[in-house]
Amino acid sequence: MSNPDDYTVGWICALATEYVAAQAFLDERHEPPAYLPPRNKNDYTLGRVGKHNVVISVLPMGEYGTASAARVAEDMMHSFANIRIGLMVGIGGGAPSPKHDIRLGDIVVSIPGNGQGGVLQYDFGKTIQAQSFQLTGSLDQPPSVLRAAVSGLMAQYESEGHQLEDAVSKVLERKPRLRKKYQRPDPASDRLYYSEIVHPGEGESPCTSHCGDGPSCLVSRCARTEDDDNPAIHYGLIASANQLMKDALIRDRLAAEKDVLCFEMEAAGLMNHFPCLVIRGICDYADSHKNNDWQGYAAMVAAAYTKDLLYRIMPQQVEQQAKALTVLKEGDHRTNISFGNHNRGFQVGVNNGPITSSFGAQ
């Protein structure tokens, strides 16, 4: 049985699909922990990536959002008290723009920018008539050791290219039962619809038959060449809230005003209390044309990137970081966003174009 004190890296997933991908990239899998506190409710997978002992956990099935992520992180820190750095790894909705050519299967890494620490909580703010959306709180940036590793890996990829697609292929060769769900889908299924085109209803009807499949409804994008990274890695702000973003107009507004690259539902519950980096594989475009075809592959490339990142970090660098549990205790009394209690705030919506908001207790 494994000693919980031997684990210094915490890796959190929101979905079972992400959990499978994370486990697939372990260099070595360990026995379950010898002991866990009675209060713990999480499921854990223990293992090694490079020279780091890593504990991976997943949100309970059917639970989503910032509060659930916060609870999982808190239980993890109490159960594995020597965790020093954290990772939130999985899938997200991309926010493509003229500035950022984001496509399905790409990766977004949470890096500080535009006055934010890497994650923007977009349901915690205010809107004023005829003005842009204004944030009324901020979230901490990832630890410097993780941001330094991101810079190092960026330089490595720019000089030598990355082998993320090859890494995914090797995993699928070892685990052939994962191929159907986790291999890269047909590139032709990567369709970006104009923002004004809304998929009818909540059904599973294909977009090609209900939304169109031609230049009048699809944004034209040049195919990536051999000189382009594919998947591409994007660095910047990830927007997080307790609601699923499926409105392309709001997506575009936040991308233009705040330079948001990606939308997801968990990271805002972690940043001020669990010192972590957020890594998201893009599985859709945060609009009404959602489907699950790209989720498995997006989870795989995010996990593959995370493995490369951990290989750039020395164990001594991790040991020099404060224990995450210490950060939790110090942060509880200094932040205006209570850990695990995101039950009040703005619900951002759209009404014929402009952003609107309304108070409410969830």
Image (cartoon, rainbow, N blue to C red):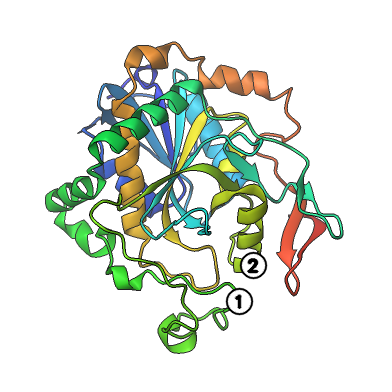
Looking at numbered disc 2 in the image, what kind of residue is underneath it? Leu
Provide the secondary structure element on which disc 2 rests. helix
- Label 1 belongs to which residue? 196
Q: Are marks 1 and 2 in contact (CB under 8 Å)?
A: yes
Does 296 sit above or below residue 186? above
Provide the secondary structure element on which disc 1 rests. loop
Hey, which quadrant is residue 296 in on the image? bottom left
Q: Nearer the viewer, residue 107 or 181?
A: 107
Q: Position of residue 220 (x, y in %)?
A: 43, 72
Q: Is residue 137 left or right of residue 285?
A: right
- Distance (Cα) linking label 1 and label 2: 7 Å
- Label 2 belongs to which residue? 249
Sort mark 2 into few (<14), some (14-19) or many (20+) by Cα contacts within 10 Å: many
Looking at numbered disc 1 in the image, what kind of residue is underneath it? Glu
Q: Quadrant of the N terminus?
A: top left
Counting every numbered tag in the picture gives: 2
Q: Is residue 348 left or right of residue 252?
A: right
Q: Position of residue 77 (x, y in %)?
A: 50, 26
Tell me the residue at 45%/84% (across/down). 205
Q: Is residue 32 visible?
A: no
Does 285 sit above or below residue 199? above
Q: Earlier in the sequence, mark 1 or mark 2?
A: 1
In the orientation shown, which residue stands out farthest toward the right?
129
Q: Position of residue 11 (x, y in %)?
A: 41, 35
Tell me the residue at 59%/60% (across/down). 244
Tell me the residue at 49%/53% (across/down). 100
Mark carried by residue 159: none
Q: Nearer the viewer, residue 72 or 142?
A: 142
